[in-house]
Image (cartoon, rainbow, N blue to C red):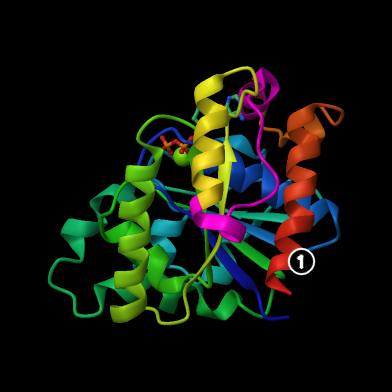
Amino acid sequence: MNAKKIIFYNQKGGVGKTTACVNLGSALSELGQKVLLVDFDAQCNLTSAVSGNARKANIYQVLVGNVQAASAVQSTIFPNLYLIPGSLDVAGLPIELVNENNREFFLKTALEPLNSDFDYILLDCPPSLGLETMNALSWADYVIIPLQCEYMAMEGLNLIMRTISNVKKNLNPDLKVLGILFTMYSKRTLLNRQVVDDISQFFGDTVFKTIIPRTVRLSEAPSHGLPINFYDKSNIGAKAFSELAKEVISRVE
Ligand SMILES: Nc1ncnc2c1ncn2[C@@H]1O[C@H](COP(=O)(O)OP(=O)(O)OP(=O)(O)O)[C@@H](O)[C@H]1O
Ligand SMILES: [Mg+2]
């Protein structure tokens, strides 16, 4: 196995990064892929969204070298789905690592040993352009850009694309954009439709064909610790993430 490493990245908050990470991960594991979720946001929303077994260690301890990555991997109650939990301590990393050379590569070094253990490693980023995000971008093979279909989406996207191109030049030449993912889409909202049309026209095939609809079930599921395919299998959100999983597999292979 040589894990495909995917991050969910948008410096804007509340656009559906964590929702995409947990539900795409679960949908991929349902298709038989062995999936590791990594919570790299100090808010730890991803960790709360998947009911896990007893906590061993967290991503902060792995990153600073106190714990081997493999021993921080915990199983979840879902088959084929594993988790490295998040930690509030991640928020202190920019200060702690300020004097370190190669501080953008701590995550890459720490997670390297896991590449042969999983089909996919999906990592949830915080909403920032800070050191944590730079570590994530230096480690990843692919970026998924969750985007809310709202006013200013295009401006945000230009900043993301510029950051990614800088990272490719300076930190990670192999980084690729796997796709732009529209989230919280409501077909009755004219603005949503316009934004999807404009961005799709501009970015073409970079946009995933699958669009994640706005549905209250997707916002309820994390409070039960369940991915949408376990919370409400027949929901349109579950169907969308299942479609997205197939699209992702076809794009990476
Ligand atoms: N498709 C959707 N339909 C309805 N609600 C959604 C959908 N996607 C996300 N939400 C809700 O919107 C909020 C923000 O989503 P989420 O936490 O996934 O965003 P985020 O980008 O990870 O946020 P942050 O930047 O704070 O980490 C959450 O309350 C979530 O439950
Ligand atoms: Mg989040």
Residue 138 drawn above or below residue 196: below
Nearest to the observer: residue 198 or residue 76: 198
Q: Identify the residue position indicated by label 1 in the image.
A: 250
Q: Callout 1 environment at 10 Å: few (<14), some (14 to 19), or many (20+)?
A: few
Name the spot of residue 6 as percent of width and height, x first.
Answer: 56, 63
Seen in the image, is 12 located left or right of residue 209? left
Seen in the image, is 91 located left or right of residue 250? left
Q: Which residues are magenta?
A: 202-223
Kindly identify the residue that appears in the image at 36 percent across and 40 percent down.
12
Quarter of the view holding residue 38: bottom right
Kindly identify the residue that appears in the image at 59 percent across and 70 percent down.
70
Quarter of the view holding residue 77: top right
Check if residue 212 falls in the magenta segment. yes
Name the spot of residue 203 as percent of width and height, x first.
Answer: 51, 56
Q: Residue furthest left?
A: 99
Name the spot of residue 161 as percent of width and height, x first.
Answer: 37, 60
Nearest to the observer: residue 122 or residue 94: 122
- Residue 123 visible in image: no
- Residue 91 visible in image: yes
Seen in the image, is 213 located left or right of residue 72? right
Kindly identify the residue that appears in the image at 44 percent across and 30 percent down.
150
Quarter of the view holding residue 35: bottom right
Check if residue 85 falls in the magenta segment. no
Nearest to the observer: residue 141 or residue 124: 141
- Count of labels shown? 1
Kindly identify the residue that appears in the image at 57 percent across and 59 percent down.
206
Residue 20 drawn above or below residue 163: above
Seen in the image, is 48 located left or right of residue 218? left
Q: Amino acid at mark 1?
A: Ser
Name the spot of residue 244 as percent of width and height, x first.
Answer: 72, 49
Q: Is mark 1 within 8 Å of ligand 1?
A: no
